[in-house]
Amino acid sequence: MQELMWKHMKNYNIAIVGATGLVGGKFLEILDEYNISIGELKLFATSKSKGKEIIFRNKQYKVDVIEKGAFLNIDFALFSAGGNTSLTYAKQAVEEGATVIDNSSAWRMHKNVPLIVPEVNIEDALNHKLIANPNCSTIQCVVPLSILDKQYGVDSIEYNTYQAVSGAGQMGLADLENNKLDRHYFPYDIKATCIPQIDVFLDDGYTKEEHKMIDETRKILHNDNIKISATCVRVPVRNSHAVSIRVTLKKDFIIEDIKNLLENEQSIMVLDDPKNSIYPVSTIANDTDKIYIGRLRKDKINEKALLMYVVSDNIRKGAASNAIQIMKGIIENGYFS
């Protein structure tokens, strides 16, 4: 678990939209873990959860529904309640004075909404009141890719993801843990197979999830010319996504130089001693904010292509922690005083 204390903090008024969901609960856990100084805390969810009581820092809070004026005097509103909720209420929150950090896909590709991974492009978030949190798999990939792009230039990227069921929320977890024969969420029994589909298929044969990774990578790296393809697979793992990345660089490279370069990023942990079975796995990544990288090697087809295996906790760094780190970056850059 992370033990962090932020400097230059005052008491911030915070609202969480989707407080009873997986990510909403993780927001609260990480706000406490990061020692965020909170003045007023408001928790919102659907009408089904209205009145539910949640304990935070030994104080009882009641979950409410969003009404007019709900975000008055709120500094930051953290949204994780799905795209429809974000489309309906994010602008209200902004109009009522809050800075919104949205975890859904609703605003990610909007031209005037920055898409932020703090290690990569926190400067894009400054002076914006509506900020998008990227797709979970995208987040863990663009941190090492941005480092490589700056040093060597990135020509193309091929993603193959192995995504845990927690990425589908409570329903995905229920399917994995369900011992009954009937299935509820995934089209096949996730306990018994991997499923090469995440989200709906589009006309070009790619899924919406695959398009998210392609489009979001280009936006975050500020490079529409990078050639990218993706195949996203759901696997019978409870938590933490893995991604096999094949990245073609514009310059020649040495593997040891790549390792040293990646190790200089505080949020990255290089685990690359395959002879001793040291490489990233989900059980190592769970409940941390690190991005674990290993299996670093040159591609056998193209000597300018690098292969690497990247694992990260999709509920923490892939969602809740990244959003709160965005908030941290805004504060530390003097946007709030």
Image: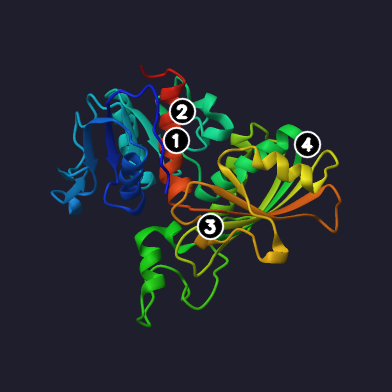
Inter-mark Cα distance, 3 to 2: 25 Å
Q: Which residue is mark 1?
A: 325
Residues at circles 2 and 1 in contact by the CB criterion of under 8 Å: yes
Amino acid carrying label 3: it is His
Closer to the chain start, of discs 3 and 2, is: 3
Q: Is residue 334 visible?
A: yes
Query: Mark 1 Cα within 10 Å, few/some/many (few <14, many 20+)?
Result: some
Amino acid carrying label 1: it is Gln
Amino acid carrying label 2: it is Gly
Residue 279 against residue 253 in the figure, above or below: below
Inter-mark Cα distance, 2 to 1: 6 Å
Closer to the chain start, of discs 1 and 4, is: 4
Inter-mark Cα distance, 3 to 4: 26 Å
Query: Mark 2 Cα within 10 Å, few/some/many (few <14, many 20+)?
Result: some
Quarter of the image with the C terminus is top left
Q: Which residue is mark 4?
A: 152
Q: Residue at x 45, y 33 (%)?
A: 326
Q: Nearer the viewer, residue 282 or 19?
A: 282
Q: Residue at x 33, y 26 (%)?
A: 94
Q: Position of residue 55 (x, y in %)?
A: 19, 48
Query: Mark 4 Cα within 10 Å, few/some/many (few <14, many 20+)?
Result: some
Q: Position of residue 106 (x, y in %)?
A: 43, 41
Closer to the chain start, of discs 4 and 2, is: 4
Residues at circles 3 and 1 in contact by the CB criterion of under 8 Å: no
Q: Which residue is mark 2?
A: 329
Q: Is residue 212 visible?
A: no
Tell whether 120 sits left or right of 3. right
Residue 92 against residue 333 in the figure, above or below: below
Q: Nearer the viewer, residue 73 or 87?
A: 73
Q: Residue at x 58, y 33 (%)?
A: 120
Inter-mark Cα distance, 3 to 1: 19 Å
